[in-house]
Amino acid sequence: MKKVICSEKAPGAIGPYSQAIEANGMVFVSGQLPIDATTGQMPEGVEAQARQSLENMKHILEEAGLNMSNVVKTTVFLQDMSLFAGMNGVYATYFEGAFPARSAVAVKALPKDALVEIECIAVK
């Protein structure tokens, strides 16, 4: 059985998908663009965008009763690999102890011309 997870503190889905799905003790968080749910705006620069994407992910996890320590896998999508160091510096501040497994890939383009998008899998 699956359960839809939705946080008003994160931007709503911009297509036919859920912010997150919980199934069998796992929470699958859809890719989070760096959009501020309050203003609908994206900050400038990869560091600020990485922070906003991670904050959105954190809010969704909190809605599921979890936190960043429950994250076991992330995937980071970057507009260009030259942005990796800036994203990575911010990313490191969101996790303590054992970091989750991670993939980071450059893509041709991201929705709304974002520089970064981050998704995750967390366990209860």
Image (spheres, rainbow, N blue to C red):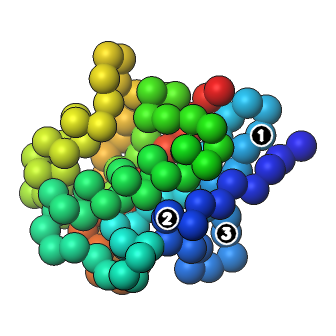
Which disc number belongs to residue 23?
A: 1
Q: Residue furthest top?
A: 97
Which one is in front, 43 or 102? Answer: 43
- Answer above or below: position of 82 versus 95: below
On the image, the x and y values in percent for residue 30 come to 55, 57
- Say which amino acid is labelled 2: Ala
Camera-nearest label, 2 or 3: 2
| Element under disc 1 | strand
Q: Quadrant of residue 51?
A: bottom left
Seen at 49% across and 52% down, the residue is 59
On the image, the x and y values in percent for residue 61 come to 55, 44
On the rendered structure, is 69 left or right of 36? Answer: right
Which disc number belongs to residue 10?
A: 2
Which one is in front, 114 or 22? Answer: 22
Q: Residue furthest right?
A: 1
Q: CA distance from mark 1 to mark 3?
A: 15 Å
- Say which amino acid is labelled 3: Tyr
| Element under disc 2 | loop
Camera-nearest label, 1 or 2: 2
Give the position of the C terminus as an image quadrant: top right
- Mark 3, Cα crowd under 10 Å, few <14 / some 14-19 / many 20+, is few
Seen at 37% across and 35% down, the residue is 102
Contact, CB < 8 Å: mark 2 with mark 3?
no
Give the position of the N terminus as an image quadrant: top right
Seen at 13% across and 68% down, the residue is 45
- Say which amino acid is labelled 1: Ala
Return the residue at label 3. 17
Circle nearer the N terminus (1, 2) = 2
On the image, the x and y values in percent for residue 11 come to 49, 71
